[in-house]
């Protein structure tokens, strides 16, 4: 013990006059190159209150094209509830909000269906995926992405794989002289879900399609029949071609919100302003991933108004069918401004409805001014 104490006390003196030790070199910075990958999500088991529940139709999320670390695992967990009609609602992603990858996960869950009957609360599902290189991706996944193309255009390598060994796209695409689209009025749409069918075929010397067959798709018989009937009427410029592929997609039928909000009293209507109160009106913007699926929603937002018209203390009271509509409503109102007033107002409530007027057309506007 004495020796240890002596060493500790005299060590600084013994080191006097010795050359200073060289500093440790900084650790090397290791960078992992990012690669373009096709991300395909797969849902896990759906559980409510700790017990597994049956699924009627768990919609497939759209594949994504992303630059990722090759071995990076991806997962996302969602909490939600199921009403007595089997519709999911109150969907919220666990973890940090605004995660860029997986933009179609919550919309696909909102379009899913569970058996009708008793309602369920405290439900959860985890989606997982690993990115696959373009060279190893499934052809059907590449074809589906070519229809949606939500996160950029497919690279040439992907188109070469889709084309295969035929000569349909070599040296150039065959020129279509007659184009016929399927009659979508005769094909029932699926709420919140895009149905598609990719047809493989050859082209005879005279330019007529031959050997038409379904290669990939969502498996909807009505969509497949309509696609085959339409393609059989196409005509191409003369010249024999082999290994052609043509996708046809049926846009999603509009899907209303699972339930509509109950209007509340408007005791502070005068304080919060009249219908012409906006100096800079809210700019309607629809959540893109929900627009693609035709999914409608709403959000009730509270806010205060400063005497000079600036909006602050914006908060979401409720949003359906997912919290994405609440975040979108916040971004809409934060950029708005009312006309100046003497005192401003507190506790104002705005009901923002996101409505698809028709298939492919949408609106997002503050509809009802309310007060709690």
Image (spheres, rainbow, N blue to C red):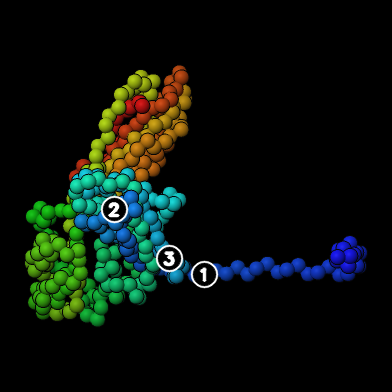
Q: Give the mark nearer the N terminus: 3 vs 2.
A: 3
- Local packing at callout 3 (Cα closer than 10 Å; few below 14, some 14-19, many 20+) is few
Q: Is residue 78 among the parts visible in the rendering? A: yes
> How far across and down, in percent of the image, does residue 4 sit?
86, 66
Q: Residue at x 29, y 64 (%)?
A: 145
Q: Is residue 85 above or below residue 351?
A: below
Q: Nearer the viewer, residue 196 or 370?
A: 370
> How far across and down, in percent of the image, does residue 53 sit?
26, 55
Q: Residue at x 28, y 68 (%)?
A: 141
Return the residue found at the far bottom.
Answer: 165
Residue that mark 2 sits on: 109
Q: Is residue 50 above or below residue 160?
A: above
Residue that mark 1 sits on: 32
Q: Which mark is residue 73?
A: 3
How far apart are the alpha carbons under marks 3 and 2?
21 Å
On screen, residue 336 versus residue 261, left or right, reads: right
Q: Is residue 277 among the parts visible in the rendering? A: no
């Amino acid at each position: 013990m004495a020796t240890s104490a002596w060493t500790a006390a005299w060590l600084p003196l013994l080191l006097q006059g010795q050359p200073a030790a060289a500093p440790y070199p900084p650790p090397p910075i290791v960078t992992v190159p990012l690669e373009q990958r096709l991300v395909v999500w797969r849902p896990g088991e759906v559980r409510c209150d700790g017990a597994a529940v049956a699924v009627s139709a768990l919609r497939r999320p759209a594949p994504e094209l992303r630059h990722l670390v090759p071995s990076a695992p991806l997962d996302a967990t969602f909490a939600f509830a199921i009403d007595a009609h089997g519709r999911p609602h109150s969907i919220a992603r666990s973890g940090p909000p605004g995660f860029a990858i997986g933009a179609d996960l919550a919309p696909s869950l909102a379009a899913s269906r569970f058996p009708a009957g008793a309602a369920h609360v405290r439900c959860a599902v985890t989606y997982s995926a690993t990115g696959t290189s373009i060279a190893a991706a499934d052809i059907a996944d590449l074809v589906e992405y070519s229809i949606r193309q939500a996160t950029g255009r497919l690279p040439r390598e992907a188109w070469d794989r889709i084309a295969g060994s035929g000569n349909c796209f070599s040296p150039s695409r065959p020129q279509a002289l007659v184009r016929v689209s399927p009659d979508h009025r005769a094909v029932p749409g699926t709420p919140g879900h895009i149905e598609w069918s990719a047809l493989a075929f050859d082209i005879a010397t005279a330019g007529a399609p031959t050997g038409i067959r379904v290669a990939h798709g969502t498996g909807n018989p009505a969509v497949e029949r309509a696609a085959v009937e339409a393609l059989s009427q196409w005509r191409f410029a003369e010249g024999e071609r082999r290994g052609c592929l043509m996708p046809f997609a049926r846009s999603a039928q509009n899907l209303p919100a699972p339930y509509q909000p109950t209007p509340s009293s408007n005791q502070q209507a005068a304080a919060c302003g009249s219908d012409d109160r906006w100096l800079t009106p809210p700019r309607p913007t629809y959540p893109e991933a929900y627009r693609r699926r035709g999914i409608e929603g709403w959000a009730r937002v509270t806010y205060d108004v400063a005497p000079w018209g600036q909006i602050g203390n914006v908060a979401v009271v409720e949003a359906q069918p997912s919290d994405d509509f609440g975040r979108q409503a916040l971004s809409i109102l934060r950029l708005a401004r009312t006309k100046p007033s003497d005192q401003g107002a507190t506790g104002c409530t705005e009901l923002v409805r996101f409505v698809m007027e028709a298939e492919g057309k949408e609106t997002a506007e503050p509809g009802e001014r309310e007060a709690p």
